[in-house]
Amino acid sequence: MKKLFLLAALVAITFGAFAQNTDLRRKIEVTGIAEQEVTPDIINVSISLKEYLNGKKKVTISQLENQLEKAIAEAGIAKEDFTVNNLSSWNYETEKKKNPDFLASKQYGVKFRDLNKFNQIMSKIDPKGIQSTNIDSYDYSKINEIKNKLKLQALLAARDKASFLVNGLGDKLGSALNITESDNSSFPQPRMYANVMFKSAAADAAAPESDIDFKKIKLSFQIQAVFEIK
């Protein structure tokens, strides 16, 4: 009898603890989405220069680099936005001594905040010395501001959807119990080009038309929200 009593007491205690830990509130879970496209106003570009032979005379990497540095300065690009990324030979001077016909190449990184300056700079460099240009990445100067706005819009969209559904049942929407954020944004894929020009949305009408359309960044945020039903 005593064992039965103890067992019944244990079951009662276990059930009470389970009931306390179980959330018996009525809930509704919904998803809100907010999206916006923006035109990149910052691009990180790699410019690769390579020596070449003009008849018997070599146009050196130093000459090409001086052209690029001068064009960068005239375009008003900040020093911190212009870097040397790579040299084609780990020991350029040694290689040149071993092989006089060795043609060195050098890669530079430039951050453009004014997209029209790319064309301005490229037009001042010997085109035969330009091996390739590569878009490494895109960015937008006010991207964090746009992201925060979209997150809030997605949350409010989720709340409005939940309120509409709950009101349809004759109930009232309570507080948010859980909020989960997902970033589904997509950026244009970097590409490598030969000696080309860029076309941006802000391009000067008087400038020659370039042959690359500037693709937009798509910012997309999803909010998964759980609300209490009153």
Image (cartoon, rainbow, N blue to C red):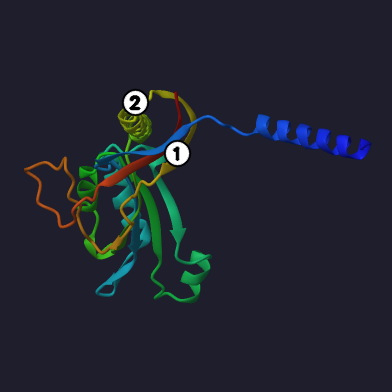
Mark in front: 2 vs 1: 2
Instruction: Establish if 29 lies above or below 46.
Output: above
Left or right? Give the position of 20 relative to 65.
right
Callout 1 environment at 10 Å: few (<14), some (14 to 19), or many (20+)? some
In percent of width and height, residue 224 lies at 43, 39
Q: Which mark is residue 169?
A: none
**Toward which corner of the image does residue 165 lie, by quadrant?**
top left
Q: Residue 38 at what x, y percent from top left?
A: 25, 40
Residue depicted at x 9% and y 50%: 208
Q: Earlier in the sequence, mark 2 or mark 1?
A: 2
Quadrant in which residue 3 is drawn: top right
Q: Quadrant of the C terminus?
A: top left
Q: Residue at x 14, y 43 (%)?
A: 203
Tell me the amino acid under the disc marked 1. Answer: Glu
> Mark 1 — residue?
181
- Which amino acid type corresponds to the residue marked 2 in the rendered image? Gly
Q: Nearer the viewer, residue 183 or 197?
A: 183
Rendered residue at 38%/47% (across/down): 184
Residue underneath mark 2: 170
- In the picture, measured across the screen, residue 130 lies left or right of residue 175, that is left
Residue nearer the viewer, 169 or 55: 169
What is the distance, in whole Å, between disc 2 and disc 1 at their CAs?
Answer: 29 Å
> Residue at the spot x=50%, y=65% of the render?
93
Secondary structure of residue under mark 2: loop
| Contact check, label 2 and label 1, Cβ < 8 Å | no
- For the N terminus, the quadrant is top right
Q: Residues within 10 Å of mark 2 (few under 14, many from 20)?
A: few
SS class of the residue under badge 1? Answer: strand
